[in-house]
Image: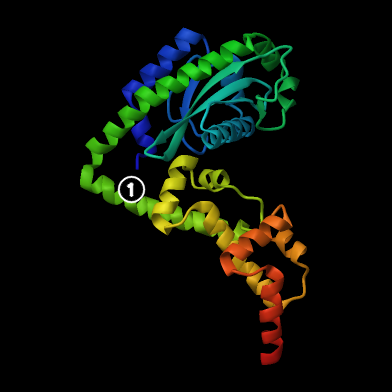
Amino acid sequence: MSSVTSLDSALIRKIASDFAQATELAVVVVNIHGEEISERFNFSDFCQKIRQNPELYNQCMLSDKRGGLKASVDNKPCVYQCHAGLTDFSIPLIVEGHLVGFVLCGQVRLIGHEDESIEGMAHTQNMWEKDEELRHCFEDIPVVDYQKVLASAELLQLIVENCIRKHINLVVIDDTGINDQQKLSINNNDHKIKKALRFIEHHFSDDIKLEDVAAHIYLSPYYFSKLFKKHLGIGFNAYLNNCRIMHAKKMLKSSGIPVATIAKNLGFSQTSYFCKVFRKNCSMSPQEYRDKHYQDAVIHD
């Protein structure tokens, strides 16, 4: 798998610099934790000063990380509002299915635009407004049309997918060799699958989806789905349902909890669907299973 250092290349710096100059937008490359791993291109004075304050800089990294993860889950650019009220967008860097970082762009103001497509990644903070210098710098930030932001995001995504990702793949192969790279990928995939299974075990009763688990282990949903089935021999939804049914059988055997309550507690939105899945797995309804096994348990006790 590629590392963060693989992102620090002359090609990426040139693309980021050229894109910043062409669009007059700010650009920076960050790792999966929101930490900057490239130069800051075309950053506004406001954002430069904001990031000199450790507390506010932590808020910047948190906003960038959340925006990046949202983009990776949706597999498309994420336009979001940072903690200071500026509009940014994030493009995920995904190499061979692995999320290795994000390209962030923006630092602009939108006036008179309210759209559900703009994510609120963090509560807008106003502590910086007490600083007169920061207020003046904020007023100097350009106001742009929302369509320009969207067009810029789509363009940057094309650049990332067709240039940066290919370059990173070449860097990885050149640095490690094919055999070493294959071994590293296998070991890393095993680790990620184990991490995914632990996450499922702790959250199977919640309304979790494949996208949630993929984001937790920093993989694209598409790649995670293929990887999961390859390692487990079963699809994600089938595995999750099997896990839930296993716990349902224990509850049916050892308690008199209503079937509808068991279904709800195990993350099923509808009792009818729970019964359908249960019958498919056990060749009988939940109540039939309880009638048979709960009585047996009482007799043996």
Q: Quadrant of residue 199?
A: bottom right
Residue at which label 1 appears: 185
Write the residue at 63% across / 33% down.
59
Say how many tags the image has. 1
- Say how the picture is coloured: rainbow
Q: Quadrant of residue 11?
A: top left
Question: What amino acid is at disc 1?
Answer: Ser
The image quadrant where one finds the C terminus is bottom right
Q: Is residue 301 visible?
A: no
Write the residue at 51% across / 32% down.
75
Residue 41 position within the rendered picture, expressed as x and y whole percent measured from the top left: 47, 17
- Furthest residue to the bottom? 300
The one of 230 and 96 positioned closer to us in this rendering = 230
Write the residue at 77% across / 71% down.
257
- Furthest residue to the front? 283
Horizontally, residue 113 falls left or right of residue 142, namely: right
The image quadrant where one finds the N terminus is top left
Horizontally, residue 294 falls left or right of residue 39, namely: right
**Mark 1 nearby-residue class (10 Å; few <14, some 14–19, many ≥20):** some
Label 1's element? helix
Write the residue at 68% across / 69% down.
286
> Is 218 drawn above or below residue 94 in the view shown?
below
Q: Quadrant of residue 177?
A: top left
> Is 297 drawn above or below residue 134 in the view shown?
below
Residue 170 position within the rendered picture, expressed as x and y whole percent measured from the top left: 27, 32
Q: Is residue 210 visible?
A: yes
Residue 221 position within the rendered picture, expressed as x and y whole percent measured from the top left: 49, 41
Horizontally, residue 218 falls left or right of residue 264, namely: left
